[in-house]
Amino acid sequence: MWLMIFFDLPVKTKPQRRQATRFRNFLRDDGFMMLQYSVYARVGRGQDSIDKHLRRVRAALPKEGSIRALQVTDKQYGRMEIMLGLAQKTEQTGTKQLVLL
């Protein structure tokens, strides 16, 4: 299973930017990979693993903003299409993460 986190956090003030950066760093440190600037995903080895990471995300919630979590199967995640206009040189169409289930 995959756990996807979508968020929209305010970044108008310095404290808000700091909280948003802390939340993004938390996601990265917890094994999430960035799909887009405010969309992160990680694989889990079943519902218990997904639930554990959902609890961690809840514990790290910033005071302001909106955060959503979505669980999808590996098959559903594999059907994701990546559509690019003029791709940046840093844009990657595939993940380099090795997933062992």
Image (tube, helix red, strand yellow):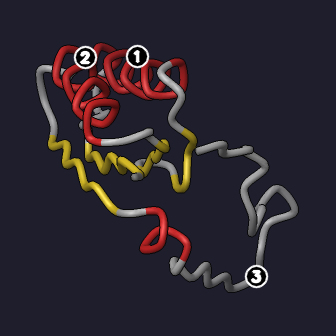
For the residue labelled by badge 3, is the local secondary structure a helix, a strand or a loop? loop
Q: Amino acid at mark 2?
A: Ala
Nearer to us of marks 3 and 2 is 2
Q: CA distance from mark 2 to mark 1?
A: 9 Å
Coordinates of residue 54 in the picture (x, y in percent): 23, 31
Question: Which quadrant of the rendered structure holds the C terminus?
Answer: top right
Contact between labelled residues 1 and 2, with CB atoms less than 8 Å apart? yes
Q: Earlier in the sequence, mark 2 or mark 1?
A: 1
For mark 2, does the 10 Å Cα neighbourhood hold few (<14), some (14 to 19), or many (20 or more) residues? some
The mark found on residue 86 in the picture is 3
Please name the residue shown 41% across and 52% down the image: 2
Coordinates of residue 77 in the picture (x, y in percent): 47, 68
For the residue labelled by badge 2, is the local secondary structure a helix, a strand or a loop? loop
Please name the residue shown 49% across and 44% down the image: 43
Q: Is residue 73 above or below residue 47?
A: below
Residue marked by disc 1 = 22
The mark found on residue 60 in the picture is 2
Please name the residue shown 61% across and 78% down the image: 82
